[in-house]
């Protein structure tokens, strides 16, 4: 496996995001304390997703509070499956239908 390179880190409201370029894939990580949240994509991230298509992955971690049930949701090619609430802002509140893979974690 190739080495992941951190290319940017931002705080988007209650969402912390980090993006990595690994091998030929581009990965955006988002996390929420609650079980759901609105995805906010800066214009440069949305443009990158349009360029990368299937090689652009979004991993969304939900339920990260002490009494939560942590899960990971994976979306590929988000610009094909998601319609932003407001096209200029690239804010997506309905994203679960685009998930390619979901992982539920056991509490420790």
Image (cartoon, grey):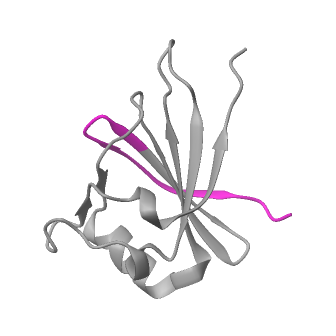
Q: Tell me if 96 is positioned left or right of 53 in this view.
A: left
Q: State which quadrant residue 6 falls in.
A: bottom right
Magenta segment range?
1-16
Res 12 seen here: yes
Give the percent coordinates (x, y) of residue 50: 41, 84
Query: Which quadrant does the N terminus fall into?
Result: bottom right
Along the line of sight, the residue nearer the viewer: 77 or 22:
77
User: Is 89 positioned to the left or the right of 59 in the image?
Assistant: left
Q: Residue at x 77, y 60 (%)?
A: 3
Q: Residue furthest front?
A: 97
In-image side of 66 versus 38 (left or right) = right
> Is the magenta region chiefly helix, strand or loop?
strand
Residue 60, percent from left and from top: 50, 48
Q: Quadrant of residue 36?
A: top left
Report the front residue among 101 and 44: 101
* Residue at 35% across, 79% down: 47
Q: Is residue 48 shown to the viewer in this render?
A: no
Q: Quadrant of the C terminus?
A: top right
In this picture, is 62 found above or below 29?
A: above
User: In this rendering, is residue 68 above or below 31?
Assistant: above
Q: Residue at x 68, y 31 (%)?
A: 105
Q: How many numbered circles are shown?
A: 0
- Residue 8 on the magenta span: yes
User: Measured from the top left, where is residue 11 in percent x and y?
Assistant: 33, 41
Image position of 67 with respect to 6: above or below:
above
């Amino acid at each position: 496996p190739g080495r992941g390179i951190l290319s940017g880190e931002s705080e988007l409201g209650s969402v912390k995001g980090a993006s990595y370029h690994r091998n030929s894939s581009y990965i955006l990580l988002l996390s929420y304390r609650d079980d759901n949240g609105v995805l906010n994509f800066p214009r440069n991230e949305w443009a990158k997703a349009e360029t990368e298509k299937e090689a652009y992955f979004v991993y969304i971690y939900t339920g990260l509070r002490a009494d939560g049930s942590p899960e990971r949701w994976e979306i590929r090619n988000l610009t094909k499956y998601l319609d932003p609430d407001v096209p200029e802002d690239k804010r997506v509140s309905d994203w679960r239908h685009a998930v390619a893979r979901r992982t539920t974690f056991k509490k420790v």
